[in-house]
Image (cartoon, grey):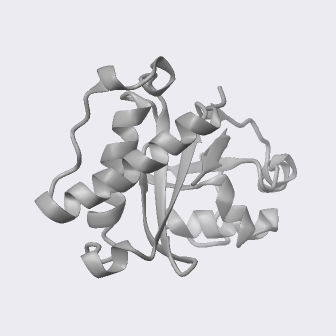
Amino acid sequence: MSLNKDHQQRLVELAEASIRHGLKTGRPLKINLAEFPPELREQRASFVTLNINHRLRGCIGMLQAIRPVAEDIAENAFSAAFKDTRFPPLTSQEFNDLQIHLSILTPAEPLSFTSEQDLISQLQPGIDGLILQEGSRRGTFLPSVWESLPKPVQFLNQLKQKAGLPANYWSNTISVSRYRAESFG
């Protein structure tokens, strides 16, 4: 389900407000869901990606829809700014240079494949987000990652590494699911 431009803008403003609130209070913005239209109260999984000067500054999200999308965005925006362990917490000085990018995910669907080459042949660059799992190791790449890793082999190898596996790792127990994302911001 696509969101209209007004709903997209409302979510971007919500993400920004949650980060601003976090800078002042150290907590995510609590929202009143009754103030949001029905489309933004539906349970949807989302990711919030923060960039400064086109460089990653934080990215946190949910792969499964467990709460209303407006609440998910407020929580994930706060977490991307202050709890992404790859970065120190966002500072007030950085806030003005922040670019906020939102991704609303479709439910993930398992892919069926017989080999690594079969999996690679099914990937749709620029469209698919992937979740790769092997035992307790798991990693995901949003569809936007195709911009920096445009070749399916490269995309898959880097995803394996993100999951804590060697790039050349393969086994018959790897599972991969595909999702799409509506991205804006």
Total labels drawn: 0
Q: Is residue 2 above or below residue 95?
A: above
Q: At 25% across and 73% down in the image, what residue appears?
A: 89
Q: Position of residue 181 (x, y in %)?
A: 64, 43
Quarter of the image where the N terminus is located = top right
Residue 160 seen anywhere in this rendered image of the structure: yes
Q: Position of residue 83 (x, y in %)?
A: 27, 63
Q: Position of residue 102 (x, y in %)?
A: 53, 51
Q: Is residue 46 above or below residue 21?
A: above
**Quarter residue 111 falls in:** top right
Quarter of the image where the C terminus is located = bottom right
Q: Is residue 15 above or below residue 98?
A: above
**Quarter residue 69 falls in:** top left
Q: At 34% across and 35% down in the image, what residue appears?
A: 71
Q: At 23% across and 46% down in the image, what residue appears?
A: 29
Q: Position of residue 155 (x, y in %)?
A: 71, 65
Answer left or right for 13 relative to 174: left
